[in-house]
Amino acid sequence: MRGLFVTATDTEVGKSVTAAALIAALAHAGRRVAAFKPAVTGLDEQPGPFGRDHELLATVASAGQTPEEVAPYRFGPPLSPHLAAELAGVKLSPTRLLDHARTQAARAELLVCEGVGGLLVPLTRDFLIRDLARALDLPVVVAARPGLGTINHTLLTLEAARSAGLTVAAVVFTPWPDREQAIHRSNLETVAQLGRVRCLTLPETTRGQLAAAGSQLDPLALLA
């Protein structure tokens, strides 16, 4: 299996847009790419400008997937997957998730998996997003905010990833502001130095600009 695993330092950081931009860029480059997201929560809430995560990923992927094929578990409340599943009376199965991911990967040459929140978010009481990333064995891309607080959150995420044996391909700061300030540049340079990691930026974008924005991240290079 080849592809990327997109995680984040926190929730609402821009992970879904980062994943969608990578998928759109790979598809635009002529690659057959499938998307996978283990669980979607918050369907009871109004979607944002990009729509619901699994619907967005299905739209940009080039493997002919439905939103339901992208995300096998879907819940209404905006909660951690383990709690959303428990309240719904659903037993979330790691085995089913891994089988589903492999099935989606088999229909394409590349798989881009978008996690849920950060690496230590529980899918079940004893199976974290990090465990899923380890099982899939894909290079990790970390979506991070460019502003205040991101140094600590990003370095902690890198430590959590590497302590589990994960390979971090890059950190993507998003949305990178049009008018860059000293704090933004300093945050990027500090994370790159202290975290010993490639740092990239993804600007504010729209659905129609995802492929162009994602191409700036050079996703094919991240696969190596």
Image (spheres, rainbow, N blue to C red):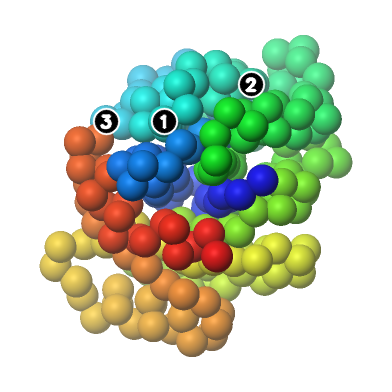
User: Mark 2, residues whose alpha carbon is within 10 Å: few (<14), some, or many (≥20)?
Assistant: some
Question: Is 119 left or right of 25, judged from the image as shown?
Answer: right
Name the image quarter holding residue 78. Answer: top right
**Image mark for residue 72:** 2
- Residue at image position (61%, 59%) is 139
Whole-percent x, y for residue 83 in the image:
71, 28
Question: Is 165 left or right of 108, judged from the image as shown?
Answer: right
Residue under label 3: 49
- Residue at image position (27%, 30%) is 49
**In this view, the mark in front (2 or 1):** 1
**Image mark for residue 222:** none
**In this view, the mark in front (3 or 2):** 2
Whole-percent x, y for residue 37 in the image:
57, 33
Q: Secondary structure at mark 2?
A: loop
User: Mark 3, residues whose alpha carbon is within 10 Å: few (<14), some, or many (≥20)?
Assistant: few
Of callouts 3 and 2, the N-terminal one: 3
Q: Nearest the camera: 184 or 171?
A: 171
- Residue at image position (39%, 83%) is 189
Of callouts 3 and 1, the N-terminal one: 3
- Contact between labelled residues 2 and 3, with CB atoms less than 8 Å apart: no
**In this view, the mark in front (3 or 1):** 1
Q: Nearest the camera: 105 or 207?
A: 105
Whole-percent x, y for residue 15 in the image:
45, 47
**Image mark for residue 62:** 1
